Image (spheres, rainbow, N blue to C red):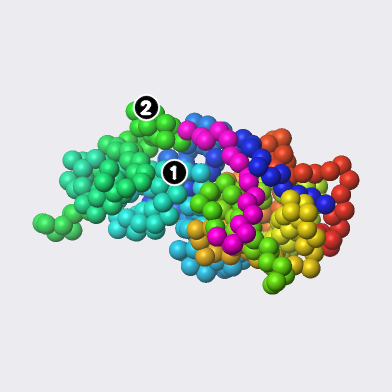
Amino acid sequence: MLVFNNNFKYRNPLQVVFLCGNKFDYKGTKDKRKVLKNFIENSDSRNHVIILEENFCFTKTNKRYLSYDEIFLKNLAQVEQLASLFADKIIIVHETLSTSAELGMFVADTSLTDKICLLVPDRIAVEENKIGGFIQLAFLSSKSGGKKVHVIYYYPDIEVHRLSENKSFYYTYFHENKIGNFLGKEISSFLQQKIENTVLFLNKQFGKLSNYSIAIDYHISNIKKEVSVNVHVGILKDQLFSLLFIPEVRRKLREEKKIYEHVNFLEIVYKQIVRDTISEITGKKLDNFALKIALKLTPCSLNQAIGYFIYMLQATKLITLEQTSKTDLSKRKIAFSVTLNRQRVYFEKIINMPSKTVFERLVK
């Protein structure tokens, strides 16, 4: 039997940075998110950057892009929400109405506020205040309540496209497609890591959720023969990392199967370990109890979150979804990177792995 360690403190060796912005330039080299990604990953090997448009699409899976349909995600709101919850830091290159909408969606969850940074062009350079009155009062003012969104201003190179005498578009770029020293120091300061995380299981006797992001709340109903569990996506992410270092799980993930089958397999494993963990904590046998797991702060399902987790690892090159079938591009086997394998000493401690375990019921 495998269980998650309870009230366990550990160091997270990886930092996932989610980059948002307006229209992505797939072919060009001047896209600001491409320049930022290069700077962030080269400045610290622990940083792993995600730009969704580089890797995924809503059309059918092909040789270059993976389809969100494979992991049961049907709209961009679900994708952005999971991406923001899984990320350790979020940087929004803010210039348009679409990036304003992204900010509004993210800060609806106040627990995300302190990990969001707006990267904004100087108002004199673009002849416009991109922040605007609403964003200033709602998210940046000391009177808005709670934590404020971090803001970094930069001085861009400009290309002006004149549509008419009174209407112009300003295209902004980083000077020489590089992050300058001053801007680099500000970004690096924002990206400073939280050193320690905690996993804590809390028994909520009356089913009321806790406000702790580190807590996994559970409630056992003897009448309904049901165990209800609520977990924050940040904790789920690290627990899923720990599963990847179980030898039997790694063996099954290396086998070729459809992407959704990999997702379903990880869901079965995760649920069994959560059930066994709560059983060990409470001393109750729960094999005949139904297990329901919900995610805090999002209506997305556990299945969707695990699917995004796999895609996140692919996007950050921590795994590779290797295509082996020439006829079915949705069939993949998972290969683990050297970088991920080096993190074993951190993540395997999250899970209690006895020297001998009976795991067959999970991997059949």
Q: Amino acid at mark 2?
A: Asn
- The answer to whether residue 254 shows anywhere in this view is no
The correct choice, above or below, for 165 with respect to 124 in the image is: below
Q: Is residue 201 magenta?
A: yes
Disc 2 and disc 1: Cα gap in Å?
Answer: 22 Å
- Could you say whether the residue bearing mark 2 is in a helix, strand or loop? helix
Locate residue 61: give its quadrant: bottom right
Residue 319 position within the rendered picture, expressed as x and y whole percent measured from the top left = 66, 48
Residue on which the image places disc 1? 115
| Mark toward the start of the polypeptide (2 vs 1) | 1
Extent of the magenta region: 192-208
Residue at the outermost bottom position? 224
Return the x and y of residue 13 as percentages of the image width and height: 61, 36
From what the image shows, is residue 103 above or below residue 69? above
Q: Which residue is mark 2?
A: 181
Residue 22 at x, y percent in the picture: 36, 54
Query: What residue is drawn where x is 24% and y is 40%?
Result: 122
For the image, the number of numbered tags is 2
